[in-house]
Image: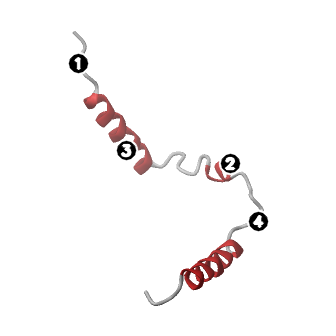
């Protein structure tokens, strides 16, 4: 690590500036964009079923 802290920080700042240019600026409502994308998908239905099965198995038995 022969670079100084200042040089390393300058590189991080340049890289951050590049990354910021790649962020979409329209800021649409991403939840609305993805909502319903798995409707009527049998694989997703199976994932949901298996998740419920796992959660139910972790519940303590009632006396």
Query: Is residue 39 positioned above or below 52 on the image?
Result: below
Secondary structure of residue under mark 3: helix
Residue 46 shows which numbered tag? 3
The answer to whether the residue labelled 1 contacts the one labelled 2, judged by CB atoms less than 8 Å apart, is: no
Which residue is at 68% across, 72% downward? 20
Q: Earlier in the sequence, mark 3 or mark 1?
A: 3
Answer whether labels 3 and 1 touch (C-beta < 8 Å). no
**Residue plotted at (25% across, 13% down):** 62
* Residue neighbourhood size for the residue with mark 3, other residues' Cα within 10 Å, grouped as few (<14), some (14–19), many (≥20): few
What number is the disc on residue 61? 1
The disc, 4 or 3, on the residue closer to the chain's N-terminal end is 4
The residue most toward the top is: 63
Tell me if label 4 and label 1 are in contact, CB under 8 Å.
Answer: no
Q: Nearer the viewer, mark 1 or mark 2?
A: 1
Mark sitting earlier along the chain (1/2): 2
SS type, badge 1: loop
Q: Which residue is drawn at 59% across and 81% down?
A: 6
Discs 4/2, front = 4
Query: At which x and y percent is residue 7?
Result: 58, 85
> Mark 4 or mark 3: which is in front?
4
Place of residue 26 in the rendered image (x, y in percent of width and height, measured from the top left): 78, 62
For marks 2 and 3, give the one nearer the viewer.
2
**Location of mark 2 (residue):** 32
Mark 1: few, some, or many residues within 10 Å (few <14, many ≥20)? Answer: few
Tell me the CA gap for discs 2 and 3. 23 Å
The Cα–Cα distance between marks 4 and 3, rounded to whole angstroms, is 36 Å
């Amino acid at each position: 690590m022969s670079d100084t802290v200042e040089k390393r920080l300058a590189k991080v700042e340049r890289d951050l500036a590049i990354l910021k240019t790649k962020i979409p600026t329209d800021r649409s409502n991403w939840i609305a964009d993805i909502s319903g994308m798995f409707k009527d998908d049998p694989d997703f239905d199976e994932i949901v079923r298996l998740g419920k099965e796992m959660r139910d198995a972790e519940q303590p038995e009632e006396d």
